[in-house]
Image (cartoon, rainbow, N blue to C red):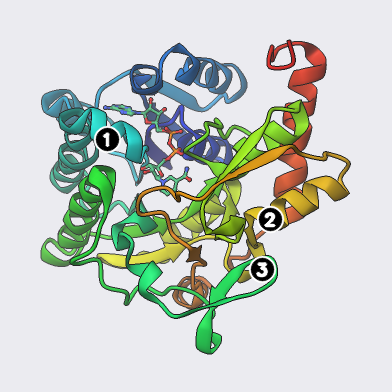
Amino acid sequence: MKALITGSGGLIGSECARVLCCDGWDVVGIDNDMRAQFFGPEGTTRPVVEELLATLATYRHYPFDIRDRQEIRDLFRHERPDFIIHTAAQPSHDKAAMIPYDDFDVNALGTMNVLVAARDFCRDAPFCFTSTNKVYGDRPNSLPLVELTTRYDYAHGLDGISEVMSIDQCLHSLFGTSKVAADVLCQEFGRYFQMPVGIFRGGCLTGRQHAAVELHGYLAYIIMCAVTGRPYTIFGYKGKQVRDQIHASDVAHVFLHFFRRPRCGEVYNLGGGRQNSLSILETIAILADMGFKMEYTYQEQHRLGDHICYISDLTKLRAHFPDWQLEYDLSRIIYELAERYTRQTWCGVDDILK
Ligand SMILES: NC(=O)c1ccc[n+]([C@@H]2O[C@H](COP(=O)([O-])OP(=O)(O)OC[C@H]3O[C@@H](n4cnc5c(N)ncnc54)[C@H](O)[C@@H]3O)[C@@H](O)[C@H]2O)c1
């Protein structure tokens, strides 16, 4: 069986390539290293692609741009994959405001190109799209909350946010909007053309390869600060803002479950759920227990549109894929990231301590 993965050099795409190759798949990856264009040379995913090519015997790579409609059509016509995982994207809110055309061209039009090529050349191949919980904009902040000692939580015993939440009439950021366009396009190809397209609205997806920056990927960033002694700033909400974390490997396994039991145009919230949720204050306490005492300052102004409390309700995901379960709990996720930054620091690869 052959899978085609867009964004195969990225955090989620590369993990999917590893998991599928280990599972016996031939994998065709597409990634043009546009991350280096978005975030500068440090954002490059080229070494990851080199690692995939060197370590996975059944991995092949095309450095194609998903915006290039003809190239994508030719590739699909030639490869005719049995399974498609579409993760290529411009992933940052802040960047989107600086490069609105590029953001929309990659996230929305690029998704359209992949969908139409799939419809025309491998219509029955299950198709997983990595959407985002940012399609809900700042609406989660309108839910009634309670303030606890170390975190905010939902009032009235609400466990998490389900797929019935409206995505309409709230603040999204340009990134959130281009992903809404792609999310709804994917739903429509599922419903209108009856294609087996699954839309997975991720929250905080993380893993060893997570590239930490201050305003994006908070868990990796805070762990990097703790390990290397870099000062950390909490932005608003008293540090009680909550996120649920899911490891890239668990994401890849959800996609494999969808491959086995696909549905047309189905939307899923995808995260670590309540068991993998934590606030910034709680993260700092866990890191202190591990021996990483952090220096941090507090700024009253929260990030624009930032969720106060976001925990994915996994009821639908678990009902549709009863054999899927999280392999990575919070301590395993945190330990893996801490180990990575510790090793980088001791090897002198990272010059942060200088
Ligand atoms: N990481 C998260 O916390 C998170 C949360 C919610 C949703 N998501 C979504 O999951 C998907 C994957 O996220 P990620 O963290 O792996 O991102 P990433 O930035 O690590 O990977 C994306 C990859 O896509 C490639 N790419 C970008 N534009 C391209 C183009 N025009 N043509 C070909 N390749 C291109 C990049 O070079 C990069 O390697 C994205 O759609 C993102 O919006 C991620």
Q: Residue 63: tell me if it is visible.
A: yes
The residue located at (17%, 64%) in the rendering is: 194
- From the top left corner, tell me how far across and down residue 3 is, in percent: 40, 40
CA distance for labels 3 and 2: 17 Å
Q: As shown in the figure, which amino acid type bears the numbered disc 3?
A: Gln
User: SS at mark 3?
Assistant: helix
Residue 96 shows which numbered tag? 1
- Contact between labelled residues 2 and 3, with CB atoms less than 8 Å apart: no
Camera-side residue of 126 and 105: 105
Task: Indicate the quadrant where residue 201 lies.
Answer: bottom left
The residue that label 2 is drawn on is 281
Task: Indicate the quadrant where residue 36 lies.
Answer: top left
Q: In this rendering, which labeled residue sits more in front, label 3 or label 2?
A: 2
Q: Residue 158: tell me if it is visible.
A: no
Task: Indicate the quadrant where residue 62 lies.
Answer: top left
Residue 246 shows which numbered tag? none
CA distance for labels 1 and 2: 29 Å
CB of residue at label 2: within 8 Å of ligand 1? no
Q: In this rendering, which labeled residue sits more in front, label 3 or label 1?
A: 1
- From the top left corner, tell me how far across and down residue 315 is, in percent: 49, 78
For residue 140, side relative to residue 315 (left or right): left
Give the vertical position of 23 relative to 151 (above or below).
Answer: above
Q: Earlier in the sequence, mark 1 or mark 2?
A: 1
Q: Earlier in the sequence, mark 3 or mark 2?
A: 3
- Contact between labelled residues 2 and 1, with CB atoms less than 8 Å apart: no
Residue 275 shows which numbered tag? 3
The residue located at (18%, 66%) in the rendering is: 169
